Image (cartoon, rainbow, N blue to C red):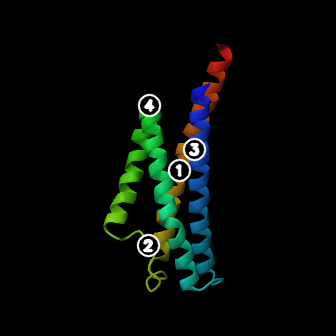
Amino acid sequence: MGDIWTWLISFFFLIALVGIIVYQLVCLADLEFDYINPYDSASRINSVVLPEFIVQGVLCVFYLLTGHWFMTLLCLPYLYYNFHLYSKRQHLVDVTEIFNLLNWEKKKRLFKLAYIVLNLFLTIFWMIYSALDDYED
């Protein structure tokens, strides 16, 4: 029964990450279609970048502490990428360069979204597998 709770908690962490990344993509799309100005878009995106990094780091540590080694190894490249961006101070969107880097920023977030959705599907699979395994016992 404990394994189901582990997968359920990680499911909610991943849903939070999907929400944060989709919010960033919506801000970039609003900027592209000129619904908001660059300053508002950059400030909205920058306000959720650090919480995204924290949630992803907590999720990776959570997998490590619960002994799910495969999921930990799957989360490590994304954690390293976030750490690399943060250590080089490239994690925030620059207001003056946001139009020049708009396509790159969208591609970066779409890649993150695909990566998180893959983790989400694996989490759902393992949650269902654990529930069925507990049901048989």
- Tell me which residue sits at (60%, 62%) in the image: 22
Query: Disc 3 marks which residue?
Result: 120
Quadrant location of the N terminus?
Answer: top right
Report helix, strand or loop for mark 4. loop
Q: Residues within 10 Å of mark 1 (few under 14, many from 20)?
A: many
Q: On the image, which quarter does residue 60 sit in?
A: top left
Q: Amino acid at mark 2?
A: Leu
Does label 1 or label 4 sit earlier along the sequence? 4
Q: Residue furthest right?
A: 135
- Comparing 99 with 124, the one in front is 124
Q: Residues within 10 Å of mark 4 (few under 14, many from 20)?
A: few
Label drawn at residue 92: 2
- Comparing 24 with 102, the one in front is 24
- Horizontal arrangement in the rendering, residue 52 relative to residue 9 (left or right): left
Q: Amino acid at mark 1?
A: Ile
Query: Disc 1 marks which residue?
Result: 116
The span from disc 4 to disc 2 (Cα, nearest Å) is 33 Å
- Horizontal arrangement in the rendering, residue 114 relative to residue 101 (left or right): right
Report helix, strand or loop for mark 2. loop
The span from disc 1 to disc 2 (Cα, nearest Å) is 20 Å
Does label 4 or label 2 sit earlier along the sequence? 4
